[in-house]
Image (cartoon, rainbow, N blue to C red):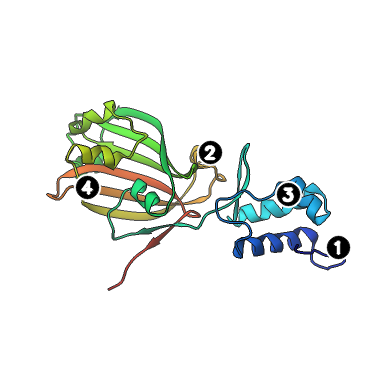
Amino acid sequence: MDDISKSNSVPLYEQIVQVIRKRIADGTYAYDTRIPSETELSKEFDVSRITVRNSINKLVEEHLLVKKQGKGTFVINKKIERNIEEFMGFSDICQLKNMIPSARVISVKMINPDDIDTDVLNASPDQKIIEVIRVRYADDEPVIIEYLHFTQEFLFLLKENLEESLYGILRERGIVPQKATKIIELCYASPNEAELLGIKNKSALILMEDYVYDGNSRPIHRCRQLIRGDRFKFVIPVT
């Protein structure tokens, strides 16, 4: 048991923060597992639940813990690593990290193309394109909002289950994404985006825009992703 001292000059809540940090570091509280409840911790440390709650909230702000409604408080997994030079779908990345990928479709509709769509997708300015908006999850935690644009050549997608791997659906039809141009910027979550991702309003997000092509350089789709920076890190190999 890790002791805390009421005679210590360090506030009780901060002492508990230090104990929980230590338990995460040494594996006592493993990644993706639920830590004891506020009631259990208050009994262990002989402090009020308010003191424990303050400690938990501080660790949530530090992105070491996450509160899942109705389930408890969990240790946040290590960041999902993406090699910026590798072409790999979100589902494939999650499976490599032994995580379960999933998706929730927010909307599927036909919209007017913008200038980027006409340029990148060779879309006709007078012909609507398909827009799919999804939230992507890793082990049931929302981590990405993505906006996908396709020309009407891909109308077959409207009959597919878009909560499955999109690239898996395309591969079944012999469409293999192989090349992409990536643009990466920083942005801040709107109230709606923050709600979808379970984060605070105006939290910093990684904005990644992908223009995706097949092996013959024919455009497949345009993808705009809003990515939680606390859950991802990007690796750029240098040769």
> Looking at numbered disc 2 in the image, what kind of residue is underneath it?
Glu
Q: Is residue 90 left or right of residue 137?
A: left
Residues at discs 3 and 4 in contact (Cβ within 8 Å): no
Label 1's element?
A: loop
Across and down, in percent, residue 232 comes to 44, 55
Disc ID at residue 53: 3
| Residue where numbered disc 4 is placed | 177
Q: Residue at x 41, y 54 (%)?
A: 97
> Looking at numbered disc 3 in the image, what kind of residue is underneath it?
Arg
The front one of 54 and 192 is 54
Is residue 128 in sight in this rendering? no
> Looking at numbered disc 1 in the image, what kind of residue is underneath it?
Lys
| Residue where numbered disc 1 is placed | 6
Work out which residue is located at the far top of the displayed protein and give it: 159
Is residue 178 in sight in this rendering? yes
Label 2's element?
A: helix
* Marks 2, 4: nearer the viewer: 4
Residue 130 occupies which quadrant of the picture?
top left
- Of mark 1 and mark 4, the one earlier in the sequence is 1
Q: Is residue 193 left or right of residue 165?
A: right
- Of mark 3 and mark 1, the one earlier in the sequence is 1
Vertical arrangement, residue 118 with respect to residue 92, above or below: above
| Residue where numbered disc 2 is placed | 195
Label 3's element?
A: helix
